[in-house]
Image (cartoon, rainbow, N blue to C red):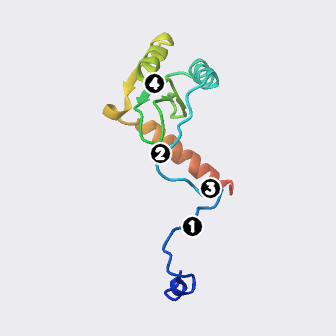
């Protein structure tokens, strides 16, 4: 808005309503975990070897998540109902689980992402 526009529109300094499709700020709505998330995690654990679980705590924009990383760095992340549920899931599937806020993300996952990025670049994607 230009300086003179304030005078042309009158003395009101009220703000306009945001557009209907505008991105909302402030509190966010977080999608809860679902049965589909659990099925995806189960499939990942059973179809890959050397899987480890990293439980990520709830944040302002996402609920508790379980990050599963295979031996080669391939990974998946899904929402889970709770930290306890994530550790119980890992124990049930004989997958070691760690608190990601304490141990961090494994280097093999970052290496895998780098390889995938390079591969996409070489393929022109």
Question: Could you classify mark 4 by the number of other residues whose Cα lies within 10 Å: few (under 14), some (14-19), or many (20 or more)?
Answer: some
Question: Could you classify mark 1 by the number of other residues whose Cα lies within 10 Å: few (under 14), some (14-19), or many (20 or more)?
Answer: few
Residue of label 3 = 121
Determine whether the residue tagged by mark 2 lies in a helix, strand or loop: loop
Residue of label 2 = 27
Q: Position of residue 50 (x, y in %)?
A: 49, 22
Q: Earlier in the sequence, mark 3 or mark 4?
A: 4
Q: Earlier in the sequence, mark 1 or mark 3?
A: 1
Give the residue at x 47% y 42%: 61
Residue of label 1 = 16
Q: Label 1 vs label 3: CA separation?
A: 43 Å
Residue of label 4 = 52
Q: Position of residue 4 (x, y in %)?
A: 52, 89
Query: Which residue is situated farthest in the top direction here?
Result: 92
Q: Earlier in the sequence, mark 2 or mark 4?
A: 2
Q: Label 4 vs label 1: CA separation?
A: 50 Å
Give the residue at x 59% y 17%: 46
The answer to whether 41 appears left or right of 82 in the picture is: right
Q: Position of residue 32 (x, y in %)?
A: 55, 29
The answer to whether 21 appears left or right of 71 in the picture is: right
Q: Position of residue 56 (x, y in %)?
A: 42, 32
Query: Which residue is situated farthest in the bottom direction here?
Result: 4
Give the residue at x 68% y 55%: 125
* 41 lies above or below 17: above
Determine whether the residue tagged by mark 1 lies in a helix, strand or loop: loop
Q: Nearer the viewer, mark 2 or mark 1?
A: 1
Which one is in front, 63 or 40?
Answer: 63
């Amino acid at each position: 808005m230009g300086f003179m526009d304030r005078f042309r529109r009158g003395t009101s300094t009220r703000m306009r309503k945001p557009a209907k499709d505008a991105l909302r700020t402030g509190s966010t709505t977080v999608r809860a975990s679902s049965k589909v998330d659990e099925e995806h995690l189960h499939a990942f654990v059973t179809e890959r070897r050397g899987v480890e679980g990293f439980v990520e705590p709830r944040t302002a924009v996402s609920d508790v998540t379980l990050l599963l990383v295979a031996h080669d760095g391939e990974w998946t992340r899904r929402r889970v109902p709770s930290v306890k549920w994530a550790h119980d899931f890992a124990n049930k599937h004989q997958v070691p689980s760690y608190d990601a806020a304490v141990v961090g993300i494994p280097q093999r996952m970052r290496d895998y992402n780098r390889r995938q990025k390079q591969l996409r670049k070489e393929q022109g994607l």
